[in-house]
C-alpha cells in the first residue's frame, strides 16, 4: 500500500510556525547578531557549511539562527537555498599545497617539513566547564586580545611560507600503493547525476565531503573497532585557507576569494594479495569546508575502506556508507515518520485484526477493538 | 605586490568603496549586469593520486559594467554586491589607456601592504603554536 497524503491544517501549521518563533523570542533577549554567530560559533558555522555543501559563512550563520542552533536543520536550510541559485562558475582546482596554514600536524612523523603547528585546537585541553564565560563582556574580550597579541613584534614578522606535504616523504620513497589503472577516475558530480554503485572515487569523495560528521565518525570508529579493518595513522592533518579562482566570461583566470578547509591524509597498511608482492601503504583522503578534524580523518578511513569492498563490513560497503552518512537525506527520511500515516497504518491494523480473528490456534485470545481506534 | 583581484577581494570594503566612488565621477558608466549572487562549484583533488572531485559550492557575487565603453567584470565569494561592483569597476578602469594610473597603483600598493601585514601578524600568532614533542625516553 502506498503512502496516502493528507490535506488541510493550514491554519494550525501556520500557527505552529509562529509558535516556533514565539519560543525563540519569548524571553525578549538581545537579538543574536549574525557577525557574532559567525565568529563566536565558528565551529557550528563550519559544520553547517560542510554538511550543507555550500561555503557561505554569513548564510550558514543566518541558518543557524533560524534553526535555533540545530545544525541538521541549518544545513538542510542552506542546501535548499543552494538549489535556488544558478551555478555560474566552476573553480580551478584548489591547491592545498599552497594553503595558508593555520594548523598542520602529523601523528606519523615527529619531524615534518616546517614542523608541527598545533594551531587552534582543543586537543590538549582539559574539558572543564569555564563558568567565567557567563560573565564575558567587551572589556574582557579587549583585555584578552591585547594580551594575546602583545608579544608580536610587528617590525620583525616572519615571512609566510608554504610547506611540503608529509605524505610526499612516503611517496618519494616508493612506499605507497601504486595507482590502480583499472579504477574509475571519471569526474562525477553527484548534485547533477544520481549516484550509482559501484561509484567512482570522485563521487565518493564528493559525498563524503558533504556527509554528516557524526555519521562518518560512527562508521569510521566501527571500522577501527573491528567491524572493518582500517585503523590508520594520521599522516598529515592541515587546516587553513586556500585560494579560489575561476575563469570569467572573457576566459581570464580571476581570484575570487579564499575558503577555509581541513585536509587529512591517513596512512594504512595495504592488504597484500600475494606474499611475494612487497608491502606498501595505502592513503585515505579527506577534505571538507571549514575546520573539522574529526570529519576529514573519518573521510580518510572510509575512503580507504571503500576501496576494498566487503559486504561484511559496513564501512567497506559504498552504498551503506554513502547513503547513511548523508545527513540531510537521513534526517528527512527519519522525520517523515512523524507525518500522518493514518491510511497505511489503519490498513495494517485491519489486516492484523483480521488475522487474529482467523487464527484458529488462539480461540481464547479474541482481540477487543477499542472504540477510539474504530475510525480512521 | 599581489594580483589586483586578490587585493580587491581581500582589502577592507570601505576604502575600496570610497576610492571607486571618487573615480566614478570622472568616467561614463553603464551597468550591464547588476550585482547578483550565484554559485561556484569548487573543484579539488586528492593530494596523493590527484583524483579530481567536487568539494562543494561557494556563494559568489558577480557584476558587469562598462566604464567609458570598456567591459569590467567583478566576481567575489560571498554575498558582496558592493565589492563585486567595485571589482568590476576597477577591472574596466585599469584597462583604460588614457587615464592616470598612478592613484590606482598607489591605492593597490597601500592595500596590498595592509593585507600582507595582517596576514603576517596572523601567521606569527599561529607560529607560536609550533611544537616539538619529545619522546618520553628523550631528555
Image (cartoon, coloured by chain):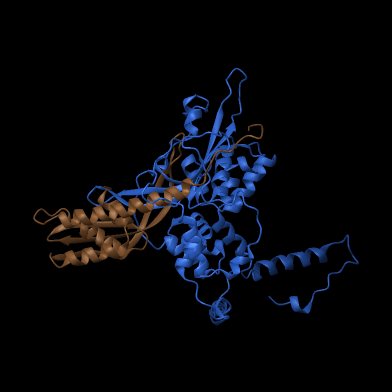
Chain colours: A blue, B brown
Where is residue A131 drawn, in percent x and y? 64, 66
Quarter that holds the C terminus of chain A: bottom right
Where is residue B63 drawn, in percent x and y? 26, 61
Q: Residue at x 66, y 71 (%)?
A: A342
Quarter that holds the N terminus of chain A: bottom right
Q: Residue A251, can we see it?
A: yes
Kindly give the residue lying farthest to the top in the view shown.
A276
Where is residue B17 drawn, in percent x and y? 26, 65
Q: Residue A3, can we see it?
A: no
Q: Taking A120 as reference, is A116 above or below it?
A: above
Where is residue B97 drawn, in percent x and y? 10, 53
Q: How many marks?
A: 0
Kindly give the residue lying farthest to the left in the view shown.
B98
Q: Residue at x 33, y 53 (%)?
A: B115
Which residue is nearer to you in this view: A306 or B12? Answer: B12
Q: Taking B6 as reference, is A279 above or below it?
A: above
Q: Residue at x 58, y 80 (%)?
A: A27
Which residue is nearer to you in this view: A161 or A79? Answer: A161
Instruction: Write down the quadrant of residue A164 in the picture.
Output: top left
Which residue is nearer to you in this view: A356 or A158? Answer: A158
Left or right of A77, for residue A353 = right
Q: Taking B54 as reference, is B85 above or below it?
A: below
Amino acid at each position: 500500500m502506498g503512502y496516502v497524503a493528507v490535506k488541510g491544517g493550514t491554519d494550525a501549521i501556520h500557527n505552529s510556525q509562529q509558535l516556533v518563533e514565539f519560543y525563540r523570542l519569548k524571553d525578549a533577549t538581545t537579538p543574536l547578531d549574525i557577525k557574532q554567530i559567525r565568529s563566536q560559533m565558528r565551529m557550528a558555522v563550519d559544520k553547517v557549511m560542510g554538511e550543507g555543501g555550500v561555503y557561505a559563512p554569513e548564510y550558514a550563520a543566518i541558518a543557524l539562527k533560524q534553526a535555533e542552533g540545530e545544525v541538521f536543520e541549518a544545513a538542510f536550510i542552506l542546501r535548499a537555498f543552494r538549489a535556488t541559485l544558478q551555478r555560474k562558475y566552476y573553480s580551478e582546482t584548489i591547491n592545498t599545497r599552497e594553503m595558508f596554514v593555520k594548523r598542520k600536524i602529523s601523528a606519523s612523523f615527529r619531524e615534518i617539513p616546517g614542523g608541527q603547528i598545533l594551531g587552534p585546537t582543543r586537543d590538549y585541553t582539559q574539558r572543564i566547564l569555564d563558568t567565567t564565560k557567563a560573565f564575558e563582556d567587551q572589556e574582557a574580550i579587549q583585555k584578552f586580545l591585547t594580551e594575546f597579541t602583545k608579544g608580536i613584534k610587528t617590525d620583525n614578522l616572519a615571512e609566510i611560507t608554504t610547506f611540503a606535504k608529509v605524505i610526499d616523504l612516503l611517496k618519494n620513497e616508493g612506499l605507497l600503493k601504486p595507482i590502480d589503472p583499472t579504477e574509475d577516475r571519471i569526474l562525477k558530480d553527484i548534485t547533477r547525476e544520481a549516484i550509482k554503485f559501484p561509484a567512482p572515487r570522485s563521487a565518493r569523495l564528493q559525498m563524503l565531503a558533504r556527509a554528516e560528521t557524526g555519521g562518518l565518525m560512527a562508521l569510521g570508529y566501527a571500522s577501527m573497532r573491528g567491524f572493518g579493518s582500517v585503523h590508520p595513522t594520521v599522516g598529515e592533518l592541515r587546516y587553513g585557507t586556500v585560494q579560489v579562482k575561476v575563469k570569467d566570461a572573457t576566459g581570464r583566470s580571476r581570484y575570487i576569494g579564499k575558503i577555509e578547509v581541513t585536509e587529512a591524509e591517513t596512512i594504512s597498511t595495504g592488504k597484500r594479495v600475494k606474499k611475494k608482492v612487497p608491502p606498501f601503504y595505502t592513503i585515505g583522503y579527506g577534505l571538507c569546508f571549514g575546520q573539522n578534524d574529526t570529519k576529514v580523518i573519518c573521510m580518510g578511513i572510509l575512503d580507504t575502506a571503500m576501496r576494498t569492498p566487503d559486504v561484511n563490513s559496513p564501512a567497506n560497503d559504498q552504498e551503506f556508507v554513502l547513503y547513511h552518512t548523508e545527513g540531510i537525506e537521513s534526517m528527512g527520511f527519519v522525520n517523515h515518520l512523524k507525518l500522518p500515516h493514518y491510511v497505511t497504518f489503519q490498513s495494517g491494523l485491519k489486516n492484523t485484526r483480521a488475522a487474529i480473528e482467523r487464527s484458529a490456534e488462539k480461540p481464547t485470545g479474541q482481540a477487543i477493538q477499542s472504540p477510539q481506534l474504530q475510525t480512521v | 605586490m599581489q594580483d589586483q583581484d586578490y587585493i580587491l577581494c581581500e582589502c577592507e570594503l570601505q576604502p575600496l568603496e570610497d576610492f571607486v566612488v571618487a573615480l566614478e565621477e570622472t568616467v561614463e558608466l553603464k551597468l550591464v549586469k547588476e550585482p547578483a549572487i550565484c554559485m561556484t562549484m569548487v573543484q579539488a583533488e586528492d593530494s596523493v593520486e590527484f583524483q579530481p572531485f567536487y568539494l562543494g559550492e561557494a556563494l559568489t557575487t558577480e557584476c558587469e559594467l562598462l566604464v567609458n565603453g570598456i567591459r569590467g567584470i567583478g566576481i567575489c565569494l560571498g554575498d558582496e554586491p558592493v565589492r563585486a561592483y567595485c571589482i568590476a569597476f576597477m577591472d574596466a578602469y585599469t584597462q583604460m589607456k588614457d587615464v592616470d594610473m598612478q592613484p590606482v597603483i598607489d591605492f593597490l600598493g597601500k592595500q596590498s601592504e595592509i593585507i600582507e601585514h595582517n596576514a603576517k601578524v596572523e601567521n606569527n600568532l599561529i607560529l607560536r603554536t609550533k611544537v616539538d614533542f619529545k619522546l618520553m625516553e628523550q631528555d
